[in-house]
């Protein structure tokens, strides 16, 4: 079996290539720079030179694969249009083969306690564009294609991820880690290696399926930021921020960090046998 992956040189992509090759699956990976070529090649994947805007390259690479995992995102102007065109090229290329598309649980907004994939949608502005794109992706199941959407929670582990970029690194520089609001809101966390395993399993999921990729750890932000303060070298030094202050400092992603989200993740466990094994997020986050 051969899988084509976009975003393979990125944070989640690197773990996903490791997971695929660990299952004996051959991988081709989009790489838009010499650095990306080296990263994916060192992980055992065959580089395919191109960018997400190179739809002809995407189509041909997908056509030559047994399945596709689309992890890449271009955050330049026109993100939604670039993602839509890339998804269409990839789906048309792979045809009836499995196509796994990346979403994110942030599209649900605040949750009322612990919820699953059927919860109402209320995305913050930074992820609102995903809704129409995912609807288009899933609609192709009616034409005999095989789309699946995986929606990661807040991904951590291997000294990377958004928590590292937006909390640990600024905290290390400032001597205190920011905490948005009073810290009572929850983050639905998942380890990067666990979400990578879900992407592999999703290749065999029923067409039209949607899975919340969360590891069962719905932790209060106050506990998370205390752990991150240890990673930043300033234990228990926390700087409270209002949402407005956080947006001015971090940009609109701060609205997503301020969400109160709790998810079960039971569907992927039940249907795919997914078993997250990294269950001590606070200890790993504290280690940086």
Image (cartoon, helix red, strand yellow):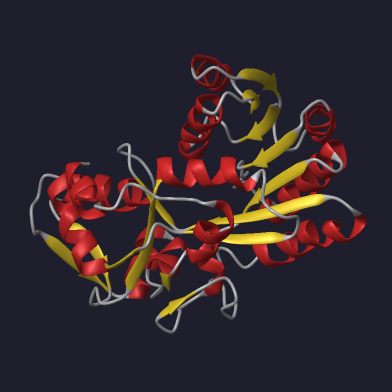
Q: Is residue 121 left or right of residue 254?
A: right
Q: Nearer the viewer, residue 85 or 91?
A: 91
User: Which corner quadrant of the image does residue 181 belong to?
Assistant: bottom left
Q: Residue at x 68, y 30 (%)?
A: 3
Q: Quadrant of the N terminus?
A: top right
Position of residue 74 relative to residue 256, above or below, is above
Q: Is residue 19 above or below residue 77?
A: above
Q: Is residue 280 above or below residue 50?
A: below
Q: Position of residue 90 (x, y in %)?
A: 79, 40
The answer to which of 26 and 34 lies nearer the viewer is: 26
Q: Quick one: which residue is furthest to the right in this view?
A: 143
Residue drawn at x 58%, y 58% is: 271
Which of the 4 image quadrants contains residue 60? Answer: top right
Q: Position of residue 255 (x, y in %)?
A: 43, 70
Q: Quadrant of the C terminus?
A: top left
Give the side of residue 233 with respect to residue 118, left or right: left
Q: Position of residue 51 (x, y in %)?
A: 69, 31
Image coordinates for residue 7, horizontal then vertical, percent: 59, 36
Which residue is at 49% across, 51% downward? Answer: 274
Q: Residue at x 57, y 23 (%)?
A: 24
Seen in the picture, residue 190 relative to 117 is either above or below; the reply is: above
Q: Is residue 39 left or right of residue 118?
A: left
């Amino acid at each position: 079996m051969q899988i084509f992956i976009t975003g393979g040189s990125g944070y989640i992509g690197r773990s996903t290539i490791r997971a695929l090759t660990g299952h004996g699956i051959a991988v081709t990976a989009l790489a838009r720079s010499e650095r990306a070529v080296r990263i994916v090649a060192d992980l055992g994947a065959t580089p395919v030179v191109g960018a997400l805007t190179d739809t002809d390259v995407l189509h041909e690479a997908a056509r030559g694969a047994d399945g596709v995992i689309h992890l890449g995102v271009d955050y330049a102007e026109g993100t939604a249009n670039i993602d839509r065109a890339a998804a269409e090229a990839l789906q048309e290329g792979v045809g009836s083969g499995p196509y796994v598309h990346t979403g994110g649980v942030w599209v649900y907004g605040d949750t009322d306690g612990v919820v699953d994939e059927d919860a109402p949608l209320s995305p913050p502005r930074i992820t609102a564009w995903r809704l129409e794109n995912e609807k288009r992706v899933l609609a192709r199941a009616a034409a005999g294609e095989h789309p699946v959407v995986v929606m990661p929670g807040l991904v951590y582990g291997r000294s990377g991820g958004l928590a590292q970029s937006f909390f640990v690194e600024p905290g290390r520089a400032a001597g205190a880690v920011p905490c948005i609001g009073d810290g009572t809101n929850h983050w639905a966390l998942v380890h990067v290696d666990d979400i990578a395993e879900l992407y592999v399993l999703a290749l065999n999921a029923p067409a039209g399926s949607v899975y919340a990729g969360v590891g069962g750890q719905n932790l209060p932000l106050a506990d998370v930021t205390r752990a991150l303060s240890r990673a930043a070298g300033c234990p228990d030094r926390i700087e409270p921020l209002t949402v407005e202050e956080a947006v001015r400092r971090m940009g609109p992603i701060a609205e997503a960090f301020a969400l109160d989200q709790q998810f079960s993740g039971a569907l992927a466990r039940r249907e795919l046998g997914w078993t997250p094994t990294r269950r001590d997020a606070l200890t790993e986050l504290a280690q940086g």
